[in-house]
Image (cartoon, rainbow, N blue to C red):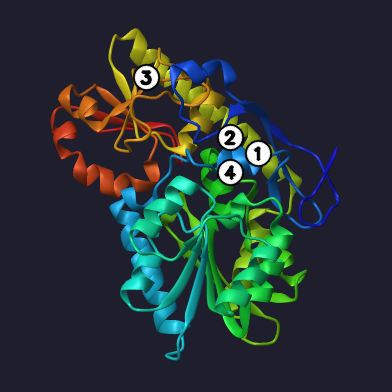
């Protein structure tokens, strides 16, 4: 039995998704024999309420010079981060030389907005190839893993931060106590922390099990985030639901006693109790729902294959690794995965080794069906792919249920 990464109480897995590879580990044929796998088991701590992986691969296996995710490839996410930056600038930054720090800053998609506004900033990005894209754009970036030690170094060189930001990053970090302590050190007395991460309530309610993969060691609830930061004398003062990543939550956190706590925090805590996020039976139901979703998707793909019709995967996302490997989807089910990211093209999907091809391969020979792995960008994609749908093409989606669209 393992101990909880937050409260150190014993935790026991309620579900295993089986053998999983590195979610963003798209690979060439000559790398197949060396591919890394781990058993992806999940638990919900009955003491502090934190949903977590029982084991996570070493961080260097996930975030390195070959990391294959660039935030800037999505127009909708670029707009979201622009609005996020404007929200921070309008509400939390003083006019007197403000300093903004972002953890997991990726290719600078958010910080470029502060740079354009002349705001002093610093990004912290552990993947060397992604950090280089940011620095080439003029975004001040440190390539490294943020923790208490790095926080002290940044404070010495740059001073304390008015705002500390993180978007879909904190849920990646198992040594999170060192990170929160680093935030506490780096943040000015009246500074603010704004974090966005996939929300556990949405995952449970809509069976969004592809949010569970190697990078997501945690799925946060308002209750568990509140518990975590209170261990470090920091307070959750506000929340705001977000549509990104199929359902996220924005958490606003401050030093203890500095800001009032909004009514929205208490309301969401009450809602989480009503949802049963503190009840082990909720997670047994989630397990059964995941199994039902898997069986429905595989049955649909098998039926389409028996009809002799083509299915192509749309977007080689990290989340698709969970869907493909948990469901046992192979190149017999989907001919290839179309993706616009050059570093993924010509490679193969983690685990199942489905070919990943350039977007043009999809456009030049439309299939009858496209399995939409990037369902969280569905609105943007549906606008883009009018020609595919007019040709008779149909979409297969699996959140919140398996169905065919078009």
- Above or below 71: residue 195: below
Q: Which residue is mark 4?
A: 215
Left or right for 180, reference 353: right
Residue 351 left/right relative to 137 = right
Q: Residue at x 38, y 41 (%)?
A: 375
- The image shows residue 256 at horizontal and vertical percentages of 70, 82
Q: Is 172 drawn above or below residue 241 in the view shown?
A: above
Q: Residues within 10 Å of mark 2 (few under 14, many from 20)?
A: some
How many labels sit on residues? 4
| Quadrant placement of the C terminus | top left
Foreground pick, 329 / 22: 22
Mark 3 → mark 2, Cα distance in angstroms: 23 Å
Q: Which mark is residue 285?
A: 1
Q: Is residue 297 above or below residue 235?
A: above
- Left or right, 166 with respect to 187, comes to left
Q: Disc 3 or 2, which lies upstream in sequence? A: 2
- Residue annotated with mark 3: 334
Is the residue under label 1 in contact with that under label 3 (CB below 8 Å)? no
Mark 1 in CB contact with mark 2 (< 8 angstroms): yes
How far, Cα to Cα, is label 1 from label 2? 6 Å
The residue lying toward the viewer, choosing from 341 and 238, is: 341
User: Residue drawn at (37%, 75%), measured in percent from left and top?
Assistant: 86
Comparing marks 4 and 1, which lies closer to the viewer?
4
Name the residue that disc number 2 marks. 289
Q: Give SS at disc 4.
A: loop
Quick one: label 4 or label 3, which is nearer the N terminus? 4
Q: Could you give the CA–CA distance between mark 4 and mark 2, rounded to whole angstroms?
A: 22 Å
């Amino acid at each position: 039995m393992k101990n909880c990464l937050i409260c150190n109480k014993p935790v026991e897995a309620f579900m295993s998704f089986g053998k999983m590879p590195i979610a963003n580990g798209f690979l060439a044929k000559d790398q197949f024999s060396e591919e890394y796998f781990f058993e992806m088991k999940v638990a919900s701590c009955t003491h502090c309420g934190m949903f977590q992986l029982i084991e996570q691969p070493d961080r260097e296996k996930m975030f390195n010079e070959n990391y294959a995710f660039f935030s800037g490839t999505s127009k909708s996410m670029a707009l979201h981060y622009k609005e996020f930056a404007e929200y921070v600038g309008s509400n939390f930054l003083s006019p007197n030389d403000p300093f903004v720090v972002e953890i997991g800053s990726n290719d600078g998609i958010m910080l470029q907005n502060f740079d354009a506004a002349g705001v002093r900033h610093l990004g912290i990005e552990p993947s060397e190839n992604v950090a280089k894209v940011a620095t080439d754009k003029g975004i001040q970036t440190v390539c490294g893993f943020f923790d208490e030690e790095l926080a002290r170094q940044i404070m010495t060189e740059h001073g304390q931060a008015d705002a500390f930001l993180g978007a879909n990053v904190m849920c990646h970090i198992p040594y999170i106590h060192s990170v929160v302590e680093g935030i506490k050190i780096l943040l000015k007395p009246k500074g603010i922390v704004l974090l966005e991460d996939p929300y556990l309530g949405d995952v449970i309610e809509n069976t969004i099990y592809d949010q569970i993969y190697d990078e997501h060691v945690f799925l946060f609830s308002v209750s568990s985030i509140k518990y975590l930061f209170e261990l470090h004398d920091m307070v959750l003062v506000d929340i705001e639901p977000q549509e990104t990543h199929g359902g996220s939550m924005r958490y606003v956190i401050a030093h203890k006693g500095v800001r009032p706590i909004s009514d929205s925090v208490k309301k969401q805590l009450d809602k989480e109790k009503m949802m049963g996020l503190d009840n082990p039976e909720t997670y047994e139901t989630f397990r059964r729902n995941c199994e039902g979703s898997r069986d429905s998707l595989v049955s649909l793909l098998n039926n389409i294959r028996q009809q002799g019709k083509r299915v192509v995967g749309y977007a080689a996302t990290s989340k698709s690794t969970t869907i493909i490997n948990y469901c046992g989807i192979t190149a017999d089910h989907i001919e290839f995965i179309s993706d616009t990211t050059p570093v993924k093209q010509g490679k193969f999907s983690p685990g199942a080794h489905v070919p990943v091809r350039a977007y043009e391969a999809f456009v030049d020979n439309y299939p009858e069906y496209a399995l939409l792995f990037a369902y969280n960008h569905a609105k943007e994609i549906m606008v883009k792919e009018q020609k595919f749908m007019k040709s008779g093409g149909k979409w297969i989606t699996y959140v919140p249920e398996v169905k065919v669209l078009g």
